[in-house]
Amino acid sequence: MKFTILFGGASYEHEISIVSAIALKKRLKSEPRFVFLDAEGDFWLIPARKMKSNHFSSGEYRKGERLTLATGGFQTRGLLKARRLEGVGTLLNLVHGAQGEDGTLAALFDFYRIPYIGPRKEASVVSFNKWLTKLYAEGLGIPTVEWQLLRVDGSRELDFDFPVIVKPLRLGSSIGVGVVHSADELDYALDVAFEFDDEVLVEPFIEGIAEYNVAGCRLGEGWSVGRIEAPGKREFLDFDQKYLDFARTDSVEEAPIDETLRADLIEAFKRVYGHTFEGALVRCDFFVASGRIFLNEINPIPGSMAHYLFDDFEGVLRSLAGALPAERTIRPDYAYIERVQSAKGPKTGSGL
């Protein structure tokens, strides 16, 4: 089975996506195709040998082959006619942030009937917006940390005490995130966050809380769940830590937790994943405090696809590609129009 990795996109996480794609090139045994989506919205075919960061930062990629979307895949532009790009196989959506995780690309893939691994439209909606993620978890009966939503043009009065953590509502990779220890620091942290989004989420910052990452996917009636990770961190995972994390090509060890907690974390992950995230390999980040599990966030396109949590990552991708949700095919038969026309009888002029 062949894979085509799509990466890049017009978002604050553009470079993170490039780093993830380069990491996957080193991890996958069978060489995939690579398609780069630049900030202008153009698709470019990237030879595997040119999958290096300076190929993109220098703009050298523009000397390559430009692609357009077509039913079932991509096509190249010729002088006389377009030519279908063969060997696309299953598309792997590795565009982090806007476009890749907000449902934009999912809608395009669905429209062009392109088989892809990644979040569908509904999954993108509930995971991209941190407020909607809270409401989604609440509907599942899974606790989340207390929160408050602030708008750029609204009040900055908080409902709880310091310290707090400030997060742009629709952004990942810890971009714009800050921990605030006192009222004197709040305005600056909010100003930074509002540079990236008009809405921010504020939560109480809980010292010493345990954090665990669980990644996996539904495979028909079964599941594939990787090792549970206990990320080593400072006060919180900042951008630099996550940038290096996305470039990771080695594996991590299973978190040293008892079987009861492990089972509870996996059960919480499966409830979050449900049927909403079918077709995607997802990583959920959980907090554990006083014996309770809290959902922190859902990563529908985790950095480097969380390959480091699986022994046979490529095998997981192949199994997932074979278990993608089926799309309904709707073909109008125009029976209603025919009945209306018959009821009206022959008629000249415009309209039915």
Image: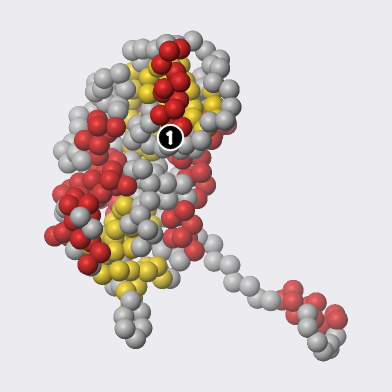
Residue 158 x %, y %: 54, 16
| Residue 16 in which image quadrant | top left
Residue 98 x %, y %: 42, 46
Residue 251 x %, y %: 18, 36
Residue 105 x %, y %: 43, 55
| Residue 187 in which image quadrant | top left
Compared to 125, does 237 lie above or below?
above
Quadrant of the image containing the N terminus: bottom left
Q: Residue at x 29, y 37 (%)?
A: 226
Q: Residue at x 35, y 54 (%)?
A: 39
Mark 1, Cα crowd under 10 Å, few <14 / some 14-19 / many 20+, is few
What amino acid is at disc 1? Glu
Q: How is the image coloured?
A: secondary structure
Which residue sits furthest left?
49
Q: Residue at x 49, y 64 (%)?
A: 111
Q: Is residue 216 visible?
A: no
Callout count: 1
Tell whether 266 sits left or right of 25: right
Q: Nearer the viewer, residue 318 or 76?
A: 76
Q: Nearer the viewer, residue 28 or 301?
A: 301
Q: Residue at x 39, y 12 (%)?
A: 181
Compared to 19, does 167 lie above or below?
above
Q: Nearer the viewer, residue 86 or 225?
A: 86
Pointer 1 residue: 195
* Secondary structure state at the residue bearing disc 1: loop
| Residue 267 in which image quadrant | top left
Q: Is residue 151 visible?
A: yes
Tell whether 79 sits left or right of 131: left
Quadrant of the image containing the C terminus: bottom right
